Amino acid sequence: EWCVSAADSSRPSIEALTKAGAHLKNNDTPVAFPTETVYGLGADATRSTAVKGIYSAKGRPSDNPLIVHVCDLQMLRSLLGNAADGQEITLPAKYKTLIDKFWPGPLTILLPNAQPSKLAPEVTAGLPTFGVRMPSSTLALSLIKLAGVPLAAPSANASTKPSPTAAHHVKHDLDGRIELILDGGPSQVGVESTVVDGLCDPPVVLRPGGISMEELRSCPGWENAVRAYKDHSEEGKAAPRAPGMKYKHYSPKARVVLYEASYNAASDGIVSADVESANVTQNGHPQNGDEKPARRVGVIRTQRWKAAAGLHVQNWREASPVAMEVDKSGYEVYTGDLVGASGHVIGELFDINLGKDTKGIAQGLFAALRELDSRDADTIFVDGIDGELDIAAAVMNRLRKAASELRS
Ligand code: TXA
Ligand code: MG
């Protein structure tokens, strides 16, 4: 069977977990499992053949390292050993405060890789460090415990696609490529873990995520932590430090147009001219008797429905709202006719409202991008949000990548 889940409770049975744990020990095809951030695609991090299975299922370039997931500190210590110079590797003091405060949870730390390494070389992709985290999802922790080995796990999407925040997102991307998906319901955080490097001074954040810069800086030794990921205007300058950042990422099929929060939305917003002139890329369908393809436009709002700020689409006729089918988190999709300046219907509009609560936006973002893909939107307009210190930083980072033509 495909998804091992109790149909109504969305909590896999102990039998399903045991089966998945045994599968991870004995097979080379990865298992998809829920974490609090996004769904992961896990394999025994100590066996090369198993780790190679992840790269082939995802279609992921093999120079992009994977995060190792542990269920307790004993398992973490089992990965430390001696450094290349023979010195024993111990957990740096700087990490102890982070581990105390944020583990289990959405934080990945970099540690020196032991010599000889306890990890399959494919996990670190040739780097002298490895990334590791202890997820807070009970299902994830139980699975690692049952497998008895650390699990290497990237997000369980096909390479370049938005990360999966529900089991059926995984099924959509990887059907036929993997055998087991543990269904734990929608992911709570909705964006990936924060990746930090505390081996350098000052310590750096390599990827914004579920733990905010503000939370990090509140820890001793992390007051001066700096951002080392490239974002918006900085793209394309220095060589990326987190190798994943140089690849196309979080991309739906549609072209994504991001309206940064600083955009003067109150006076401009998205006017019908923007929508009409939006390039139809790959999914435009010809309309009855019309040479021009009909627009299929998606809108993702991050403000309350009909609030003054944010995206404002003129000239469309609203049909009744329908619930977003992708999850049960209560997001709504409004659908309606898109009406051109001439008064003719020029296409369809799908309007998703993620609300203004930043946590809720993070939770629903990837699902919304996927939902609009499933409706064949050719262009998606997204309302940006403010805030560089909280989880908004992670949301905007993902959106900027999805919207970036260069996708650096
Ligand atoms: O929340 C998450 O972190 C999810 C869930 C499944 O745990 N996992 C995830 O993995 O997002 P992935 O493979 O999609 O992203 C891993 C990120 C990449 O940006 C990668 O470059 C970085 O972590 N990374 C891993 N090991 C690294 C290392 N040794 N040095 C620098 N960056 C590293
Ligand atoms: Mg990923």
Image (cartoon, rainbow, N blue to C red):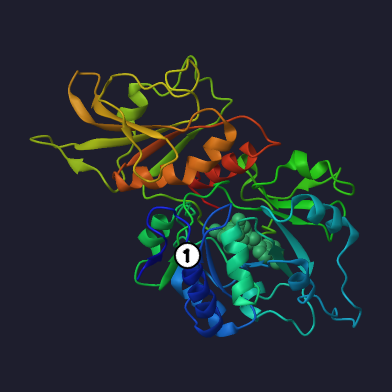
Quadrant placement of the N terminus? bottom left
In the image: residue 21, left or right of residue 219: left
SS for callout 1: loop
Q: Residue furthest left?
A: 289
Which x, y percent locates residue 23?
A: 50, 79
In the image: residue 403, left or right of residue 37: left
* Amino acid at dot 1: Ser
In the image: residue 197, left or right of residue 24: right
Q: Quadrant of residue 335?
A: top left
Going 29% across and 43% down the picture, which residue do you hit?
Answer: 375
Going 12% across and 34% down the picture, which residue do you hit?
Answer: 290
Ligand 1 picture quarter: bottom right
Q: Is residue 305 above or below residue 67?
A: above
Going 33% across and 38% down the picture, which residue do you hit?
Answer: 279
Which x, y percent locates residue 241?
A: 70, 59
> Disc 1, ligand 1: is the CB inside 8 Å?
no
Q: Alpha-carbon neighbours of circle 1 within 10 Å: few (<14), some, or many (≥20)?
A: some
Q: Which residue is mark 1?
A: 13
Q: Nearer the viewer, residue 113 or 169?
A: 169
Q: Quadrant of residue 72?
A: bottom right
Which x, y percent locates residue 130?
A: 72, 69
Q: Is residue 50 above or below residue 301?
A: below
Q: Nearer the viewer, residue 72 or 245?
A: 72
Q: Is residue 247 above or below residue 268?
A: below
Q: Quadrant of residue 231?
A: top right
Q: Does the rendering let one see residue 128? A: no
Q: Nearer the viewer, residue 388 or 184?
A: 184
Which x, y percent locates residue 73?
A: 77, 67
